[in-house]
Image (cartoon, rainbow, N blue to C red):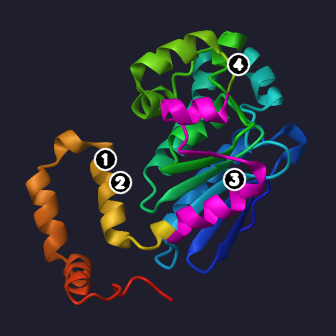
Amino acid sequence: MTYSTLDLKIDSYCATISLNRPDVRNAMNETMMQEITSAFHSVGQDTSIRIVVLKGEGASFCAGADVNMMKNSIEQTSEENKTGTMLLSTMYKTIDGCNKPVVGIVHGHAFGGGFGLCTVCDIVVAEEKTLFSLSEVLIGIVPAVIGPYTERKIGNSWFRALGISGERFDAPFAEKIGLIHYSVKENDMKMMTDHVVKQLLKGGPNSQAKFKEYLRDMDSFDSADVIAEIRANDEGQEGLTAFLEKRKPNWIKD
C-alpha cells in the first residue's frame, strides 16, 4: 500500500513507520491519523515482522495536530469535531494494541499528539535535546484522548502537573518521569536503537504479544492461567527446552 503522509519500510524482521510531513514537523492531520492506523493494522497482521519502529522524518518527531485541522475545528459542531477525535482515538488504540513490540525513536519535538505517540510505544529512545509538552491547555483544549495512556505511562501526579501547565521539558526529564526509557546523545541514537531491537528479537514473539495483552488489562486475567497457558504452548515448550539444553530457541535467527 502507498501512503501520502508516511513511509513504511520492512527490513528483515523489522518494520519502520516514518511520519513524513517534515515541512510541518510531522503534524498530524486526518490523513496521517488514518494512515498510521492502517500501517499498524498491516504490520500487525504480517507474521514475518517481529518489531515495529516508529519515527519521524525531518527536524521533529511530531509537533502535534496540524494547524489547518485545528482551524477547521473552530467552524465545526461538537458532533463534527467528534468525528476527527475518533480518528485520533482509533489511531492510539491501534498502536497500543499492536501485537508486536513498538519502539519509538524521538527527536526534535513531541508536543500534544506527538507526546501521545510516546505513551503508546513500548520502548522510547529520544535524543537528549528533544522537547516534550502536553501543550493542549495552552490553546484552550484538554489532553483527553491521550489521557488514559499518559496516566498509565507517567502516573497521575505528573499527568496532572504537566497536563495543567503545558510546560516544556527535555529528554532527561522525560526519562526521569518514565515517558521515555533512554535519553541519548544524537550520535548514539542508532547504536541505542540497534541495541533495543536486537534485545527484543531475543524474546518469543507469542509471549511478547501475550505480555502486551496482559499489561493492557491485568485485572481481567488470572495470572496463574496466563503462565500455565504460555508454558504449555509450542513457543513456551521450545523456550524452556532450549534453556535446559543450553541452546538458542528457534525464534532467534542468526
Q: Residue at x 14, y 67 (%)?
A: 229
Residue occupying the point 48% across, 67% down? 199
Is residue 75 at all visible to an observer of this figure?
Answer: no
Q: Quadrant of the N terminus?
A: bottom right
**Who is closer to the viewer here, 57 or 73?**
57
Q: Position of residue 159 (x, y in %)?
A: 49, 20
Is residue 80 inside the magenta stretch?
A: no
Q: Disc 3 versus disc 2: distance between alpha carbons?
A: 21 Å
Numbered circle sitting on residue 39: none
- What is the secondary structure assignment of the residue under circle 3? strand
The amino acid on which the numbered mark 4 sits, given as a three-letter code, is Gln
Task: Report which quarter residue 25 is drawn in.
Answer: top right
Q: Which residue in the structure is indicated by mark 3?
A: 55
Dot placed on the residue nearer the N-terminal end, 1 or 3: 3
- Alpha carbon distance from label 1 to label 3: 24 Å
Majority SS type along the magenta span = helix
Q: Which residue is mark 4?
A: 76
- The amino acid marked with disc number 3 is Lys
Which contiguous range is marked in magenta?
170-198
Whichever of labels 4 and 1 marks the residue nearer the N terminus, that label is 4
Alpha carbons under labels 2 and 4: distance apart: 37 Å
Q: Residue at x 44, y 34 (%)?
A: 153
Which secondary structure, mark 4?
loop
The nearer-to-camera label among 2 and 4 is: 2
> Would you place residue 84 above or below residue 226 in this image?
above
Residue tagged 2: 212
Q: In which image quadrant can residue 26 be found?
A: top right
Circle 1 sits on which residue? Answer: 215
